[in-house]
Image (tube, rainbow, N blue to C red):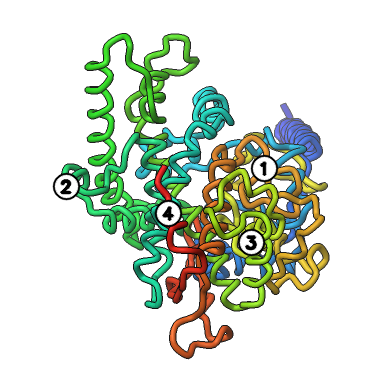
């Protein structure tokens, strides 16, 4: 073999190697192009650029619904934020909210996993935080068909009437003196719900000693529960920091959960003892008794455990008590800022009810101005201004934008309720805007959704409305109201605090005087 032949051999091998490499590169390029085209770039809603680790949490203040409202004015009715590790889509217009809560309701029907759901609702066993699935569908069906049916709510009307009458007698005792209204409102709501759900007032008299809580302590527990259920807990958004519990919220969640569990165990034990004593003839007289009977039903799709019964019971007590008291307190606050509204309310009440008896639930449909006051209050001060967060169950398109599976979805009703394109002078309390207006706040009109809409709408909204309307009508019918001392309406503090509900930051204090004959307040069923 010549020297030229010896040199030629490696040149041939290099050529083959280059050809093979070029073929591999070409194949890789083709594969990359195919994959790139099959996985198109996502078109996400507009939003602020997130920071590393914290995302956009730096933009959220003490009142998240107001911070997010300000951002929506800049980025539009559907925007994307990032809270820590999680993408968040915010809907804040009638059209985008209708898509989330109606058109694509099933896609957004689940709930995100949060510390509040885990530690305060028996690991997501309640109706509010349980994820979408067989358990939640069964829970919703039980609420609508059993717990909150029109027949059952009607059978409890006497309880609502008796407790509101007791409230009026109690307020008469404080006539002429400054009264902290929230305490009285919470008491009447708690008494109504306790008798309907638990069968008696467990926090009244000797019963309070048996459960270890005074009514005041129990109300503080309810306030704590609602606050913690709505806080922006860092561990929910940056999971790898959760174990540090930087804000101390998880510790507080566990503490309040232990207190509620002690109370609920006592309630269930008493009910089970009554069931055993009643034998086969036992008939449930309250919602806990009904839940325990349902738990024994072998035909249930999903077994209802003792923890599930406790979670349901806690939902019923907390939701029914807090939302009613908060709404009525805000209504009275707004009217005290515009005292001329009292004259309109009194004229209607005196014309429809008169002054020789108390307001009854059958009167409410004939009190359009009273109903307008309630609607206007729920517009300006929705109990849950951003509703309860939802979770996207699958990749989807929303208003032309891509929303990946696992995205958390917020519905900011506060923005819609204050939208000047929908409401004339939206920052003013003007109940007359709802006179001759079909919008009713019951889930069908997306301009006003105090209780949400769609599958995850609050199942107890009808009970909440009954308590709110009867309580407010009775307070207005029974008393004249004014601010204490020389305080002027414009000096009344209207600041709020944020949680799952949004109560007044400073409890309302007012002075009342009876406006009906004394014998009317001595109502006894």
Q: Residues within 10 Å of mark 4 (few under 14, many from 20)?
A: many
Q: Given this view, does label 3 or label 2 mark the residue nearer the observer?
A: 3
Q: Which residue is the site of mark 1?
A: 453
Q: Is residue 522 above or below residue 111?
A: below
Question: Dot 2 corresponds to which residue?
Answer: 209
Cα–Cα gap, marks 1 and 2: 40 Å
Whichever of callouts 2 and 4 sits on the residue coming sooner in the sequence is: 2
| Residue hosting label 4 | 226
Q: In the rendered structure, which disc, 3 or 4, sits on the residue that comes first in sequence?
A: 4
SS assignment at label 3? helix
Using the image as rendered, state which of residue 229 and residue 163 is in the foreground. 163
Q: Which mark is residue 350?
A: 3
Mark nearer the N terminus (3 vs 1):
3
Q: Is residue 133 above or below residue 281?
A: below
The C terminus: image quadrant: top left
- Farthest residue toward the bottom? 486
Which is more toward the observer, 143 or 14? 143
- Residue 8 in the image: state x and y as whole percent: 76, 33
């Amino acid at each position: 073999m010549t020297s030229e032949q010896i040199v030629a051999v490696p040149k041939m091998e290099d050529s083959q190697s280059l050809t093979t490499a070029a073929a591999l590169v070409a194949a890789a390029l083709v594969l990359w192009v195919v994959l790139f085209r099959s996985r198109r770039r996502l078109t996400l809603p507009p939003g602020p650029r997130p920071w590393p680790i914290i995302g956009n949490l730096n933009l959220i203040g003490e009142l998240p619904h107001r911070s997010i409202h300000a951002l929506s004015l800049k980025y539009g009715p559907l925007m994307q934020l990032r809270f820590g590790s999680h993408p968040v889509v915010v809907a804040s217009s009638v059209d985008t909210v209708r898509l989330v809560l109606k058109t694509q309701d099933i896609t957004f029907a689940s709930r995100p996993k949060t510390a509040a759901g885990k530690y305060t609702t028996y690991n997501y066993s309640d109706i509010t935080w349980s994820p979408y699935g067989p358990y939640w569908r069964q829970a919703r069906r039980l609420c609508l068909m059993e717990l909150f049916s029109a027949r059952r709510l009607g059978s409890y009307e006497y309880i609502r009437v008796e407790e509101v009458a007791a409230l009026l007698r109690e307020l008469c005792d404080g006539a002429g003196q400054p009264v902290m209204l929230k305490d009285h409102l919470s008491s009447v709501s708690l008494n109504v719900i306790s008798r309907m759900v638990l069968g008696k007032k467990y926090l009244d008299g000797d019963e309070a000693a048996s459960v270890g809580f005074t009514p005041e302590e129990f109300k503080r527990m309810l306030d704590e529960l609602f606050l913690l259920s709505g806080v922006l807990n860092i561990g929910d958004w940056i999971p790898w920091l959760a174990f540090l519990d930087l804000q101390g919220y998880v510790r507080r969640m566990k503490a309040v959960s232990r207190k509620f569990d002690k109370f609920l165990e006592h309630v269930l034990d008493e009910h089970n003892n009554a069931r055993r004593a009643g034998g086969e003839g036992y008939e449930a007289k309250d919602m806990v008794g009904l839940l325990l009977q349902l738990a024994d039903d072998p035909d249930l799709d999903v077994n209802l455990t003792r923890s599930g019964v406790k979670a349901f019971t806690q939902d019923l007590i907390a939701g029914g008590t807090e939302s009613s008291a908060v709404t009525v307190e805000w209504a009275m606050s707004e009217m005290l800022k515009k005292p001329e509204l009292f004259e309109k309310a009194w004229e209607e009440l005196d014309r429809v009810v008169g002054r020789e008896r108390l307001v009854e639930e059958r009167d409410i449909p004939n009190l359009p101005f009273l109903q307008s006051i309630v609607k206007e209050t729920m517009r300006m001060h929705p109990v849950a201004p951003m509703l309860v967060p939802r979770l996207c169950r699958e990749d989807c398109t929303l208003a032309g934008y891509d929303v990946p599976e696992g995205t958390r979805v917020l519905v900011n009703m506060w923005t819609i309720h204050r939208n000047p394109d929908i409401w004339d002078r939206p920052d003013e309390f003007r109940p007359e805007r709802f006179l001759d207006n079909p919008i009713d706040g019951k889930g069908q009109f997306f301009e006003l959704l105090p209780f949400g809409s769609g599958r995850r709408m609050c199942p107890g909204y009808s009970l909440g409305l009954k308590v709110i309307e009867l309580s407010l009508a009775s307070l207005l019918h029974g008393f004249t109201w004014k601010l204490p001392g020389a305080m002027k309406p414009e000096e009344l503090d209207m600041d709020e605090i944020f949680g799952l509900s949004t109560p007044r930051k400073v409890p309302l204090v007012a002075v009342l005087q009876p406006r009906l004959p004394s014998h009317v307040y001595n109502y006894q069923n």
